[in-house]
Structure formats: C-alpha cells, structure tokens
Amino acid sequence: MGREFRKATAEDLSLICTTFARSFWDDPVMRWLFPDDEVFRDGTVMQGFFQRVMAHNCTLVTPDVAAFSMWIPPMRPELDVDTGPSEPPSDEMLAKFIALREALVANTPEENHWYLQMVGTHPDWQRRGIGSTLIREGLSWAERDGVPAYLETETIENVAYYRHLGFEVRTEWDVAAGGPHMWGMWHP
C-alpha cells in the first residue's frame, strides 16, 4: 500500500463505511452513540454523514480504501447534500447528538483552520504509517493555506499518536448525557 492515496469518490462510500466500522469498533464516541453491534457492524449508520463530509472533496483514501481521512476546509462551509431518507433518531439518540454537538461547538477554535473530521485505518493495516501519511497530506493543505489544523479525539492513546504528528492538546472536556472524555488538538 505504501504512501499511495487519492481523493475519494462516491463509489468509495461503502468501503469507507466498512473501514470505519472496523477501525472505530472500540471508539468511545461512536460506541456511545451506536452501542448496538448489529447497527454498527457495517458502518452504514454513518453513510449520510460521510456523504456530507465527502462533498467537500477533501477525503483521502488508499487505493483499496483500507484507510481514509476526512478533512473539512477552513470556515467549515455547509454544503447542501441530499443523503436520501433517514429514520428519525430515538429520544435517547437525539439527546446524545445534542450533547455531542454542544460540546464540539463550545470547544471548536474560533481561528480559521483545516478540520480533520475523521481518520481511520482497517486494523489489519494499522501501525504501518498509512494514516499518518493521509494526515500529513491534509496538514500540507493547511500549510499551503497558511492556517492551523484542528481535530478532536477520545482516547489518551490517540492524544500520543497525534502529538507525534505535531498536534498539541488545546482543550479537554466531558460530553454531557454520559458521553466520553474528549481532547481538542491543534496543529499550528
């Protein structure tokens, strides 16, 4: 797989969902939102969200989509994307989404920045530098534009991982409604 990557296309969506489900199986935020293994198993629970993020045309994938990184450009522009019909969330799920959104909004830096929405590598391919390569490419966009980069993470192991890529903890918080502890990390 090496250092090869490309921008994702709509045809990659189902493979991104699969890689997401495998790489985020134990993720504190995702499993708090989607605790049912059957609902989470194939990752399609995130399909509409992924379509909205991918509309920015800043999602990178490896040729086989065993890894991906989803970036949102400065100012985080809202794009009108038709993701098709969806089931309304339960009251519990809605409360979790609201708590997470409020925490993220309260901790999002006001400065203009590139946002690393998500990065994932299938467990069979982790620890080979593939995710780091995709992150470094996004960081090159931030450098090109003369702005920092920002992300949130939910594990102390990921804090260490992102630190080796030049990110530093800027904020940390607990999500209401029984949500996880999170760190906001900044790459100047």
Image (cartoon, rainbow, N blue to C red):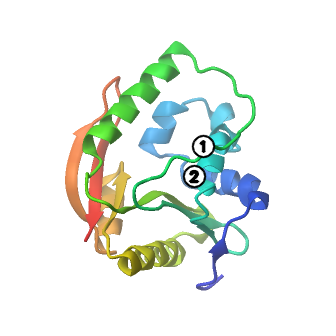
| Callout 1 secondary element | helix
How many other residues sit within 10 Å of disc 1, few (<14), some (14-19) or many (≥20)?
Answer: few
Instruction: Determine which of the numbered discs, if any, sits on residue 117 in the image.
Output: none
Quadrant of the frame with the N terminus: bottom right
Q: CA distance from mark 1 to mark 2?
A: 6 Å
120 relative to 181, above or below: below
Q: Nearer the viewer, residue 39 or 93?
A: 93
Left or right: residue 83 versus residue 35 is right
Q: Is residue 171 placed above or below 71 in the rendered structure?
A: above
Which residue is drawn at the image coordinates 50% and 32% (left, top)? 33
Choose between 109 and 90: the one closer to the eye.
109
The amino acid at mark 1 is Phe
Residue 132 drawn at (x, y percent): 46, 75
Residue at horizontal 43 percent and vertical 80 percent from the top: 140
Q: Residue furthest right?
A: 11
Q: Is residue 2 left or right of residue 178?
A: right
Q: Which residue is mark 1?
A: 49
Evaluate if marks 1 and 2 touch, with contact meaning CB atoms under 8 Å apart: yes
* Picture quadrant where residue 3 is located: bottom right
48 in relation to 114, above or below: above
Residue 31 in percent (x, y) is at 50, 37
Q: Which residue is identified by label 2?
A: 53
Q: Can residue 83 be seen? A: yes
Q: Residue at x 63, y 55 (%)?
A: 55
Report the front residue among 15 and 84: 84
Residue 66 x %, y %: 66, 67
